[in-house]
Amino acid sequence: MWEQILPGLRIKIFFTIVLGIAYPLLMTGIAQVIFPHRANGSLITQNGKVIGSEIIAQGFSKPEYFHPRASGAGSGYDATSSAGPNLGPTSAKLLYGTVKTDDKKNEVVDFDGLSLRIVHYCLDNDIAYESSIPLDRFKDSKGDLDEVKLIKAFNDSKTPLVFKPQTLIPADAITGSASGLDPHISPANAELQAARVAKTRGISVDQVNHVVAQFTEGPALGLLGEPRVNVLKLNLALDQQFARK
């Protein structure tokens, strides 16, 4: 019996040592020597403190910052819960959003949808638009847009709200990536946000665009992918060069 068991046991121990211990240690050692920054997570530090990673998106919503792509990772930009919405291009939920009733019997946004994102993108960046119903009708007592009412209007089967931007909105400005953690936006998206950032910081659009150009990355190896802008690195550079006035 042992004559049959021992060969298999030796092989198991051998491959456990080689593939489970030696190989990972070898690859880790090589990575630490050749590209230690990437091997350790492409971390970004400021004043000796880790504030993020070049390859994981963070949420920015203040007007003085460039905003990243939408995120469906957890409650948003959660690196421990990477995920996309998994909705097809004809999905009514993706296009118009949905609402739900919470534990307190209040209607709240369940999924915002592309239409609502377009509205916010236009308003945030002063982009001209046409709306079949004045947006003032969807504001609450504080003057803020009531997102639940907007989503219901977009989903109205008889007279749905039609909202059309007068400028072409880049796809990445209103959609999330498959991971929900894409740290980049397109140069076109950055261009449309530049005026808002410049106005909030009290600088010229040309100054903002100059910084954007510095952090615009070309296709990998000159062939793979599209030009892109790293949002976290761009926003940090703006804070260093042009603090909000």
Image (cartoon, helix red, strand yellow):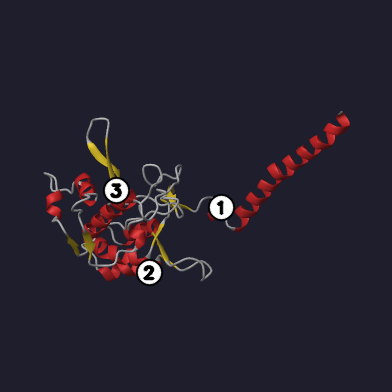
Q: Residues within 10 Å of mark 2 (few under 14, many from 20)?
A: few
In this rendering, the label closer to the viewer, 1 or 3 = 3
Mark 1 burial class by Cα count in 10 Å: few <14, some 14-19, many 20+: some
Can I make out residue 202 in this image?
Answer: no
What is the quadrant of the N terminus in the image? top right
Estimate the x, y position of residue 239 in percent, counting from the top left.
Answer: 32, 57
Q: Of the residues under marks 1 and 3, which one precedes in the sequence?
A: 1
Given the image, on which type of amino acid does mark 2 rest?
Ala
Disc 2 target residue? 213
Instruction: Give the side of residue 84 with respect to residue 38, left or right.
Output: left
Judge left or right: residue 24 versus residue 130.
Answer: right
Q: Position of residue 168 (x, y in %)?
A: 29, 67
Q: Which mark sits nearer the N-terminus, 3 or 2?
A: 3
The one of 41 and 177 positioned closer to us in this rendering: 177
Q: Is residue 18 left or right of residue 155?
A: right
Amino acid at dot 1: Ala
Residue lying furthest top: 1
Describe the element under mark 3 as helix, strand or loop: loop
* Separation of residues labelled 3 and 2 (CA atoms): 34 Å
- The residue wearing badge 3 is 97
Q: CA distance from mark 1 to mark 3?
A: 39 Å
Q: Which residue is mark 1?
A: 39
Q: Front-most of 36 and 126? A: 126
Number of on-image labels: 3
